[in-house]
Image (spheres, rainbow, N blue to C red):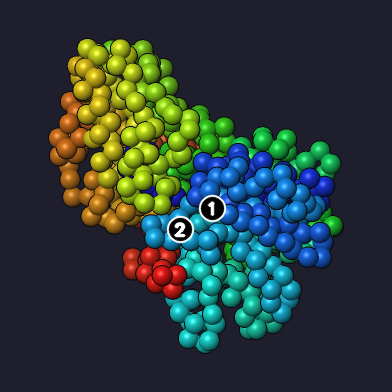
Amino acid sequence: MSDNVGHYCGLFGVYGHPDAVELTYLALYAQQHRGEEAAGICSSDGSQIVRYTGSGLVTDVFDKRKLEQLRNPHAIGHVRYSTTGSSHYQNIQPFLAEYAAGQVAVAHNGNLINAPKLRHDYESRGHIFNTTSDTEVILHLLADPKIQNADDPLAEALRYLQGAFSLVFLLPDKVIAARDPYGIRPLCIGQFRNGAYCIASETCAFDMVDAEYVRDVVPGEIVTIDERGIRSRFFVDAKVRHAHCIFEMIYFADPASNVFGQNVHESRRAMGKQLAREAPANADVVIPVPNCARCAAQGYHEESGIEIGRGFTTSHYVGRSFIQPSQQIRDLVVKMKLNVIKPSVAGKRLVVVEDSVVRGTTTRGKMGALRKAGAKEIHLRVASPPIRHPCFYGIDFPDQKELIADGRTVEQIRDYLKVDSLTYLSLDGMLSCMTFPPESYCTACFSGNYAIPVDHQLTKFALERHQMKMFE
């Protein structure tokens, strides 16, 4: 993906394994692509929860000594990104709190669109918040006496939440996972050889820790793992329309993962093939924009018969630019990360495959670099439709007016990017590459059809940005 867009987080949890903390560390490392700004682990010995978090990559935050201090048989972990202005220690998860029912830790992937309203309601009743994160409202819901008196307090609390949420809770004696009724964010269950269960955002985490995928957490489901094994219940009607985030398949998930019932690499490869059918080009070589467009470029090459090549070299020592906390740093990271391989592109007609284009600024720079290196023609092919609408379910897309496709025709975008031709994959073509029926996916950023009604002013990102004064 181009143009420095933030996204959501990665989760892991394990119950009843002697190496739970080390396994959580490894699983977070495997999901580092979901957030590079901060990481945290909470663990329990069955009676007391302890916590350690820090800013930076998983390898920066934890060392052998810290992992040993956390060593317990039950653990949950989190890697995160932040929106602009909310890169603060107080917001690093998992959060740990103590209330009338005891200790609870929570890690969250997604965006609660009604968090500002819930927060305002609790603050007006005297509650004190310690962070600017939407996730904190979940803890206040759990501590609410009215909810505590319900037959199933957790289920009752979850019914108040609106938006996207995959959650992992750690109580002293159990791990609990829950997923929003629309299934917007992925969440899955794995099992170790010793019988212990684990929870992860992506199946690539199971590969890292040598666990076997069991199944996905069903949208609207609560899964409890404790000494009695694994149990399930639903907090809503399971027949709610699903709205799986299509951007998991386009960009965010690891190609090795199986997400929403299909392999990510194969889905991107299929998109590339469909793109070649919809947008052929007379060219000498197919060039992917690293790293995620490689799968789509492979598909384009296979369908078109055009040779695939390498036009950019990538630094493996630079983080993913879209999850860095400031625009200036993100721009510098992009420049450091990609460099053109001049002999591969000079004098050639290129099909450049990109997974998506958001603002267009960095894409324009990449195309300019190819032109400067001597590319004869540049035919840009984007393996997703134009992004014309903001996301309110966990991807920090910029304001709509900042999206390059907002109010512009494809020809106007082509002219801005300074390429010889530009074609996007059609919405129907993209959805034809998915396993589930088209109505099972959230495509709001392309179509403007939001699965959950949204007050554009009351979002997680508005909450984090406008309340940062409490830390200044």
* Residue neighbourhood size for the residue with mark 2, other residues' Cα within 10 Å, grouped as few (<14), some (14–19), many (≥20): some
Q: Residue type at mark 2?
A: Ser
Residue 312 in the image: above or below residue 15? above
Find residue 419 and report its horizontal and vertical position in percent: 19, 28
Residue at the (60%, 39%) spot, across then down: 30
Q: Quadrant of the N terminus?
A: top left
Label 1 and label 2: CA atoms lie apart by 9 Å
Q: Quadrant of residue 361?
A: top left
Residue at the (14%, 35%) spot, across then down: 415
Residue 21 in the image: above or below residue 133? above
Where is mark 1, residue-wise?
A: 55
Where is mark 2, residue-wise?
A: 87
Do tag 1 and tag 2 residues touch (Cβ < 8 Å)?
yes
Find residue 127 and report its horizontal and vertical position in percent: 54, 82
Q: Quadrant of the C terminus?
A: bottom left
Q: Residue type at mark 1?
A: Ser
Residue 92 in the image: above or below residue 420? below
Foreground residue among 366 and 134: 366
Residue 393 seen in the current view: no
Residue 253 seen in the current view: yes
